[in-house]
Structures are given as C-alpha cells and as structure tokens.
Image (cartoon, rainbow, N blue to C red):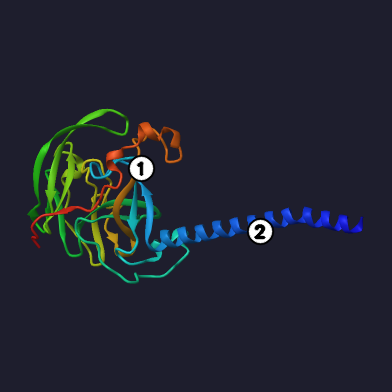
Amino acid sequence: MTEQKEIDKQINEKPCEEKKEEWGELAKTLILALLLAGIIRTFLYEPFNIPSGSMKPTLLVGDYLFVSKTSYGYSQYSFPFGIAEFEGRIWQDTPKRGDVAVFKLPTDTSTDYIKRVIGIPGDKIQVIGGKLYINRKKVDRELVGYKQIEDRSGRTKRVAEYIETLPNGVMHTIYEEDDIHPLDNTPEYTVPEGHYFMMGDNRDNSRDSRVQEHVGFVPLDNFVGRAEFIFFSTNGKARFFEFWKWPITIRYSRIFNSISPSISLEKE
C-alpha cells in the first residue's frame, strides 16, 4: 500500500510540475517578445498614428505609419518615456529638405508632431499670397485640380490641389483653400543654425513653424525620425483594436504606401 501511495503521489505531482514549467516558458517568451519589441521601437522603427488633417493629402487621419529611428541618429527624444538624458545626437545625420519627419514640439516635448522639412539651417523662408518662397525665390507649384474634402467638423469644403517642387527637386502634393488665410502671408524667417523650418502639406490648416509662439524653429535634437511607410489605415470610424469593424473601415489602398517624396531633376 505504501508503494502505491508513493506512485499516486508522484503521478499527481508530475502534472503540477509540467504546468509550472509551461507557465515559466510562456513568461520567458513574453519577456523576450517585449524586450525585442522595445529594442525595435527604440532603435529601429517606431509606430505612430495620424490624429489630425494637417498633412493632407500625404497623410490622413487614421493612418498608422512606421518612423525610422536610424535616419537622423539618436537624441534623448529617441528613447521612450525620457529614460535617457543627454545632449546632442549620436550617429548624427541631418534631415533633408522634403522629408516627412516626427519631432518633439519645442514648446512641449511630451507632444509629437509630424510635418515636412521645408527650411534647413541658413534658409530664408516666407509665404506671400499663399506662395512659398525659399531664399527669396518662389517655389514652383502646378495646379492639379480641385477637390471636396471634409474638415474636422464634418463639413465639406473645396480645396485646390498642387504639386509643389522644392529647390532640391523633391515633389509633393499640397492643399490650399485660398491665398488669404492668416498663414498665407508671413514675415521672412531665417532658419538658425542647428534648426529646421517645418510645414504641413495642408497649408491653411497646419500649426507649424509659421506659428512661432507654438512651434517655431525645430532643433535637430528634437527630431525623432523620418516617416517611412503606412502599415495600416482606417477611415476613422474604427479604432485600431476594433478589429471587427476593419473589413468596412480599412483603407486598403493606403496600406504599405511609401511616404518618401518623389524626386525630379536635382536643382540644388
């Protein structure tokens, strides 16, 4: 009888030990997965979503995109939750005119913004009658046509769509409602050393470097990374975790779209 009890005890204990081992392996797998995701997010690619229409038509509300952390090197703002505090950048590379970049708002570094690099250090930037001037030369733009789009309140408005060609040959699309908006006539700004002038592609609906008291010139250290491609897009009627709504809300044509601008003949 004693031997039988011992055998029964061993049989009962074995499943418990196996379950503990299974839970231990699962915990290790989860920890490794989280660690790997953290490394990728910190050093390689970080996901962002678009909450406003300031970058229309390039980016729409509901777009989810990956930002390359290697494009400009690393500053303290490359790391999540401000866990690293140091000045300057390591493995530094400079943003190029025409890049779409995520940066920390200079007046509130807890807030991420995404805009296009328009002015580089030393540039003189001005908007006159809705037309962009860089170093006192009007930037070329070609009218594509007119579109009806919705604003934040859901009202429909008519905008002009242009293809704008920056001095280095970068071509991208912009929206203009008219040429009499308050941001359509600005002073001339001289971009300081180590700073950049950022603008949204939805020119009359973007708080950007033209709003000096809110954004102003963006220091290089504030750059998080360059926007690379859209990996998911919804029309705003379903949040990312509401997967049961995806079939009717996903913008399939936008998934895996590159955000990199096209290049015409080099001008600079």
Residue 8 bears which disc, if any? Answer: none
Mark 2–mark 1 distance (CA, rounded to whole Å)? 44 Å
Q: Quadrant of the N terminus?
A: bottom right
Residue 133, image x, y percentages: 11, 53
Left or right position of 138 against 197:
left
Left or right position of 187 against 39:
left
Which residue is nearer to you in this view: 231 or 28? 28
Q: Is residue 214 visible?
A: no
The quadrant in which residue 13 appears is bottom right
Residue 120, image x, y percentages: 20, 62
Three-letter code for the amino acid on which mark 1 is drawn: Pro
Residue 51 bears which disc, if any? Answer: 1
Q: Residue most toward the right?
A: 1
Which residue is nearer to you in this view: 57 or 193? 57
Residue 28, image x, y percentages: 58, 60
Which residue is tagged 2? 21
Q: Quadrant of the C terminus?
A: bottom left
The quadrant in which residue 2 appears is bottom right
The local secondary structure at tag 1 comes to loop
Three-letter code for the amino acid on which mark 2 is drawn: Glu
The 10 Å Cα crowd at callout 2, few under 14, some 14 to 19, many 20 or more, is few
113 in relation to 181, above or below: below
